[in-house]
């Protein structure tokens, strides 16, 4: 299928499949299941410690490391700290002081 895209992300025993054609993805999963002990867990919400939110309707995918950030806050006893916005405006371009 020339108009089909499959993207496979593999890390040790974790696999994530992105696809443009559901039939092609199904054939790939069937082939993997036939050869390997393979379990399809459905739509992705977590992968390698990253939270993934896919909004097909709006064509958006959000990926964050919320859990990792929380673990760091707890490790350094900062889980109760007060959030503070950066003092710079978003998009501020910084230059070297030597210029």
Image: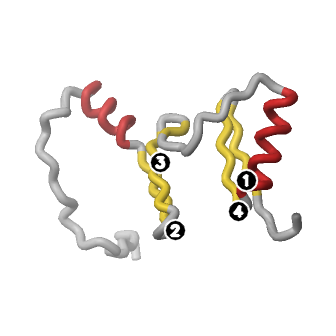
Residue denoted by label 2: 59
Q: Is residue 20 left or right of residue 98?
A: right
- Rounded to the nearest angstrom, the CA distance separating label 4 from label 1 is 9 Å
Q: Earlier in the sequence, mark 3 or mark 2?
A: 3
Q: Earlier in the sequence, mark 2 or mark 1?
A: 1
The N terminus sits in image quarter: bottom right
The residue sitting at 47% across, 48% down in the picture is 52
Residue denoted by label 4: 20
* Residue 81, x across and y down, in percent: 13, 39
Q: Nearer the viewer, residue 81 or 47?
A: 47
Query: Label 1: few (<14), some or many (≥20) within 10 Å?
Result: few
- Rounded to the nearest angstrom, the CA distance separating label 4 from label 3 is 18 Å
Residue denoted by label 1: 7
The C terminus sits in image quarter: bottom left
Query: Label 4: few (<14), some or many (≥20) within 10 Å?
Result: few
- Rounded to the nearest angstrom, the CA distance separating label 3 from label 2 is 13 Å
Q: Is residue 38 left or right of residue 66?
A: right
Query: Label 3: few (<14), some or many (≥20) within 10 Å?
Result: some
CB-based contact (under 8 Å), mark 2 and mark 4: no
User: Helix, strand or loop at disc 4?
Assistant: loop
* Residue 15, x across and y down, in percent: 68, 37
CB-based contact (under 8 Å), mark 2 and mark 1: no
Q: Nearer the viewer, mark 4 or mark 1?
A: 4
Q: Is residue 3 left or right of residue 81?
A: right
Residue denoted by label 3: 52
The residue sitting at 82% across, 70% down in the picture is 3
User: Helix, strand or loop at disc 3?
Assistant: strand
């Amino acid at each position: 299928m020339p108009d089909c895209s499959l993207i496979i992300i593999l890390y040790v025993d974790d696999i994530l499949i992105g696809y443009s054609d559901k039939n092609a993805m199904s054939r790939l999963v069937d082939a993997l299941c036939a050869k390997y002990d393979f379990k399809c867990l459905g739509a992705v919400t977590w992968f390698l410690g990253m939270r993934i939110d896919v909004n097909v309707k709006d064509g958006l995918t959000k990926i964050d490391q919320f859990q990792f950030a929380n673990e760091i806050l707890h490790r350094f006893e900062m889980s109760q700290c007060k959030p503070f916005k950066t003092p710079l405006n978003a998009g501020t371009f910084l230059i070297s002081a030597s210029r």
